[in-house]
Amino acid sequence: MLPVAASLSFGLPFFAVEDIMKCSKITILAVLTFLPAGAAENPSGDAQSAWMTEALQAQELLHHHQFPQAAESGERALRLAKHFGPADRRVASTHHLLGLIYRDWGHCAEARTNYSRAIAIWRKQAEATHRYLFNAMTNLISVTCECDDFVAADKAFQRYGPDLRRYRSDALDDARVLSLEGVLARNHKDYGRAESLFKQAIVIMEHSPETAPVDLVAERSSLGVIYDKEGRYEEALVESSRAIEYFEKNAPLHPALMASYNNAACSLASLGRNSESQRRFEQALEMGKTLYGEDNHVTAKIMLSYARVLRDNRQSPAASAWQKRGAEAFRRSLARQQGTVDMEDLRKK
């Protein structure tokens, strides 16, 4: 039925523009997806058919990275699902689908709100499906990390950690939790522990026949971020370059390709290979604008990183232009998020 994938709370990104005036590495966590059988229970004739049509259309549009259209279809599906009652599983599944759409679209607040609502509904079910809850909780934590709100991510992991251990069902679930712990350890600058956690997750994924290649490549790219933080720029570049090669061939619109371009650019800049770094930044920027538009925190961070490299290359006019453009895009993105967080949900939190 609808995919229920792999992220927490409603805190907004807490950093200021000045905090990201460095070469920002981007981690895109693997997203676990599955088809929740319970989503289609208790069919109700035309109403069920109408909901199913919109939900499947939203899913298909998401697959083709048509985010605005996917969100519109998903919101229509949600309105239809609510006719079955506010605690219906179809409402939870549709919220989770919207979480996936907004996450891939780079809309932090909307993704987190929808994941949280899905969790709240599934927890009220008489026979809550552990798989749905595990994926929704890990998706919520993941998107909070991706949106750089690590204070909220730490709190979420503490809150949901016992549930994740109780709801895990296989080795891939263990890998997912290890990956999340690795990202949180990285934020606390415990790079040795982060490296160990990512490597453990990768070993599990490599030995599981159910691992999607795209998820394994994304995980290895995340390990490359740790290498960069440790000053191991050549090793970091190797991982980013492998990811670029894979995604360009197999998934040219995957957000992890944009992240890999950016991360390779940062490593190249650290190695003094500035002209190559600029080319990678330009690829990352082009993809960021295609996927997200300019008024998005990810695209803005790439612009600011690019501005720093241009400045280091003594291209001051261009650097100043990109710095101003990135700072303005970042502030607009933050203002949009502040305007879309649901205050009722914030009070419930």
Image: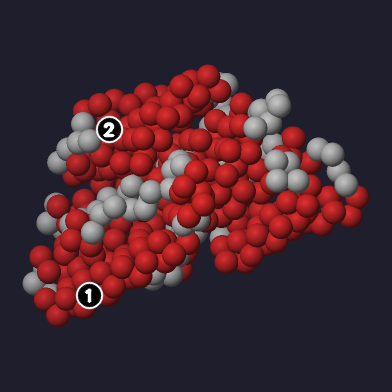
Residue 126 in which image quadrant? top right
Q: Which residue is mark 1?
A: 324
Quadrant showing the N terminus: top right
> Seen from this angle, which residue lies furthest bottom?
317
Q: Is residue 142 above or below residue 12?
A: above
Residue name at image x 55 percent, y 23 percent: 167
Q: Secondary structure at mark 2?
A: helix
- Neighbourhood count class around disc 2 (C-alpha, 10 Å): few under 14, some 14–19, many 20 upward: some
Residue name at image x 66 percent, y 49 percent: 94
Q: Amino acid at mark 2?
A: Ala
Identify the mark nearer the N-term, 2 or 1. Answer: 2
Q: Position of residue 262 (x, y in %)?
A: 30, 56
Q: Amino acid at mark 1?
A: Lys
Judged left or right of residue 34, residue 329 is left
Q: Is residue 239 visible?
A: no
Query: Where residue 113 is drawn, which disc sits there?
Result: none
Q: Secondary structure at mark 1?
A: helix
Residue 16 in which image quadrant? bottom left
Viewer-nearest residue: 322 or 228: 322
Q: Is residue 234 above or below residue 18?
A: above
Residue name at image x 21 percent, y 51 percent: 267
Q: Position of residue 326 (x, y in %)?
A: 27, 70
Q: Which residue is mark 2?
A: 185
